[in-house]
Amino acid sequence: QVQLVESGGGLVQAGGSLSLSCTVSVRIFTNYALGWFRQTPGKEREFVAAINWNGVITRYADSVKGRFNISRDNAKNTMFLQMNSLKAEDTAVYYCAADAWISFSTEIGPRSFSHWGQGTQVTVSS
């Protein structure tokens, strides 16, 4: 059984920073690739970033490249998303996701992951 819990969402002004965390309850954390997605009302869930089991491989959506940084601490079963230079269009519910294996050489989408957290709201005021 895999359980994911996000934290760190909130309200921030445009240009500011926010850090999200995702704690994963699983027997062997390093068996899992992890990802962040976001969703706004009426839109499909969109890929933000992903990281492989040891943090060596990362992928980012073009819209966040250079502003967001994904990382993981395998000793603490936790993944992070550092978000800088936030824009109003970054406003969304952010979800973390996990799967035992994903391909980092093809497009990453919601179907790449089997396990999901409940989401945390990020609101960027302009």
Image (cartoon, grey):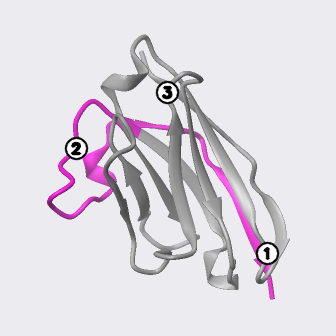
Q: Position of residue 66 (x, y in %)?
A: 51, 76
Q: Residues within 10 Å of mark 3 (few under 14, many from 20)?
A: some
124 horizontally vs 80: left or right: right
Q: Position of residue 80 (x, y in %)?
A: 59, 46
Q: Secondary structure at mark 1?
A: loop
Residue 92, compared with residue 86, is above or below; it is: above
Residue topped by disc 3: 74
86 horizontally vs 3: left or right: right
The span from disc 2 to disc 1 (Cα, nearest Å) is 32 Å
Taking the spot 81% from the left edge, 89% from the top edge, the residue there is 126
Which of the labelled discs sits on residue 102, or is there none? 2
Disc 2 to disc 3: CB gap under 8 Å: no
Residue 100, compared with residue 89, is above or below; it is: above
Residue topped by disc 1: 16
Q: Is residue 118 magenta?
A: yes
Residue 61, compared with residue 18, is above or below; it is: below
Taking the spot 43% from the left edge, 59% from the top edge, the residue there is 49
What kind of residue is marked 1?
Answer: Gly
What kind of residue is marked 3?
Answer: Asn
Disc with the residue nearer the chain's start (2 vs 3): 3
**Bounds of the magenta span?**
98-126
Q: How many marks?
A: 3
